[in-house]
Amino acid sequence: MDFGTLIRKEWGAVSFVVTVIAGLIIVPAAFIFLNKGPAPVNLPQPETSPSVSVSASPSPAASPSASPSASPSPSPSPT
């Protein structure tokens, strides 16, 4: 089986392999030339300056209120 016959019969597999090989070359090259490599993540730092904290006054405890609930009305029983 020569190369031409292989491409005609298995063109999907050949195109997949060519695409993967091209990606293995192009993606790292793009990272190198464009300098888009992994960078350290900048996390927000907590403030080190003293801040004034205001203490909240305790709120009165909420009392549970009775909510009206729908009760089923008795249905007449067949006699």
Image (tube, rainbow, N blue to C red):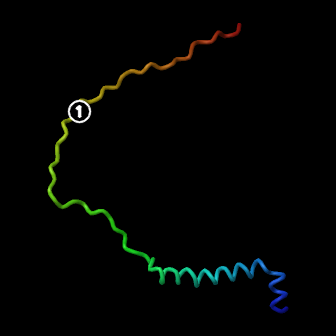
Does residue 10 appear left or right of residue 27 in this picture? right
Residue type marked 1? Ser
Neighbour class for label 1 at 10 Å: few (<14), some, many (≥20)?
few
Query: Measured from the top left, where is residue 36 in percent x and y?
Result: 45, 77
Residue 31's place in the image compared with 58, above or below, is below
Does residue 26 appear left or right of residue 16 in this picture? left
Query: Measured from the top left, where is residue 48 in percent x and y?
Result: 18, 61
Q: Residue at x 21, y 59 (%)?
A: 47
Residue 30's place in the image compared with 41, above or below, is below
Locate the C terminus and report the quarter of the image it occupies.
Answer: top right
Residue 41's place in the image compared with 3, above or below, is above
* Residue at the extreme front of the image, as rendered: 34
Occupied quadrant, residue 66? top left
Locate the N terminus and report the quarter of the image it occupies.
Answer: bottom right
Q: Residue at x 73, y 80 (%)?
A: 15
Occupied quadrant, residue 40? bottom left
Residue 57's place in the image compared with 21, above or below, is above
Q: On the image, numbered disc 1 is attached to which residue?
A: 59
Does residue 42 appear left or right of residue 23 in this picture? left
* Residue at the extreme top of the image, as rendered: 79
Q: Residue at x 57, y 82 (%)?
A: 26
